[in-house]
Image (cartoon, coloured by chain):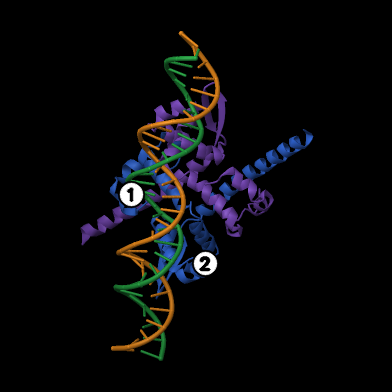
Chain colours: A purple, B blue, C orange, D green
Amino acid sequence: MSKLPGVMKSSLSSITSTLNSAEDCNISKLTPEALTLLADFFKVLSEVSRLQIICSLKRGAKNVTEIMQETDLGQANVSKHLKILTQAGVVAREQRGVCVYYRIANPFLFDLCDLVCKALSLQVEQQSQQVQELSQLGQKN
Amino acid sequence: MSKLPGVMKSSLSSITSTLNSAEDCNISKLTPEALTLLADFFKVLSEVSRLQIICSLKRGAKNVTEIMQETDLGQANVSKHLKILTQAGVVAREQRGVCVYYRIANPFLFDLCDLVCKALSLQVEQQSQQVQELSQLGQKN
DNA sequence: AGTTTCTAGAACTATTTAGTGATATAGTAA
DNA sequence: TTACTATATCACTAAATAGTTCTAGAAACT
């Protein structure tokens, strides 16, 4: 998992130069450590519980208790996932009195998920068409 | 992991309707099973070895042996990862004689990775700026 | 036929991690 | 102070999985 201390430790400049900010961000030119950063980011989004939390935060900041109620996850579990999301820079933490409110740190996340959703739905549609064609073939023979 | 049989089994129509193809692909409206599809997709991309394989395929189709040589992964390991990537629809399989060639099934993948890379590099840059500011504060006191 | 090469799969180990219950800590109110 | 609420963390279990070794099968060549 992408722990911030680890990121800081391993010489930020070398990473920024290979994960090169704006243009020329070609994945085939990435160093192994940049690939690890990329994999860690995807890993953060690869759990249903964390996606549920992200969804529940889409409509605004929430504290842990509210997230628990909306997602039906246990308290310790929610706290653990929120820690992972925070360390990854996906959500931001803000303490207000006893409560701790979390919010999406970067709206880019939603664009990303929407993009992937569209690609996946296209893929599923194509598969279902192929299944239909196969079943029609089966009826002919 | 997104096994194709599982996808087919669980009533494609209900998934396509919630993972709704084109517009209105709002993540906060996704059903649990659609969230699972999304999480499974990210999980496929969350391993460095698989990203390495994807990178090595960017410059064209390759067989298993070539991928092994380019990635320094073991043969059984490469085959296993390729199976996962194939089942997820990320790569396509084509047999030519004894060799089996794999290629990226959907170039959308590269756009996706580039997008995430840019976001990550921005994030890392911001972190490094904050670190600099903190260290300057430390020198003043 | 036998031999070699290429790929896939089975069985296994070691590591990671999601979830849970108990506990710790901090703010708030009586 | 005491009690209560909200969050974080620790310790643990169970499940998933990356990597490895060995084996099986299929194509090509002698």
Q: Which chain letter matches label 1?
A: B
> Is B4 left or right of C28, judged from the image as shown?
left
Residue A38 image position (x, y, % from top left): 55, 50
The residue positioned 46% from the left and 69% from the top of the image is B63
Could you say which quadrant of the image residue A52 lies in?
top left
Rendered position, B99 above or below A68 = below
- Which disc, if any, is residue B7? 1
- The residue identified by callout 2 is B72
- Which disc, if any, is residue A28? none
Residue A75 image position (x, y, % from top left): 42, 31
> Is A21 left or right of A1, judged from the image as shown?
right
Residue C3 image position (x, y, % from top left): 37, 86
Could you say which quadrant of the image residue B123 lies in?
top right
Label 2, residues with CA under 10 Å away: few <14, some 14-19, many ≥20: few
The residue positioned 25% from the left and 56% from the top of the image is A136
> Which of the two residues, A10 or A63, is positioned nearer the viewer here?
A10
> Which of the two residues, B68 or B32, is positioned nearer the viewer here?
B68
The residue positioned 64% from the left and 48% from the top of the image is A9
In front: label 2 or label 1 = 2
**Number of marks present in the image shown:** 2
Q: Which chain letter matches label 2?
A: B
Label 1, residues with CA under 10 Å away: few <14, some 14-19, many ≥20: some
Could you say which quadrant of the image residue C12 lies in?
bottom left
> Is B125 left or right of B75, judged from the image as shown?
right
Rendered position, A22 above or below A76 = below
The first of marks 2 and 1 along the sequence is 1
- Would residue A60 be seen by someone viewing this image from the given angle? no
Residue B138 image position (x, y, % from top left): 74, 36
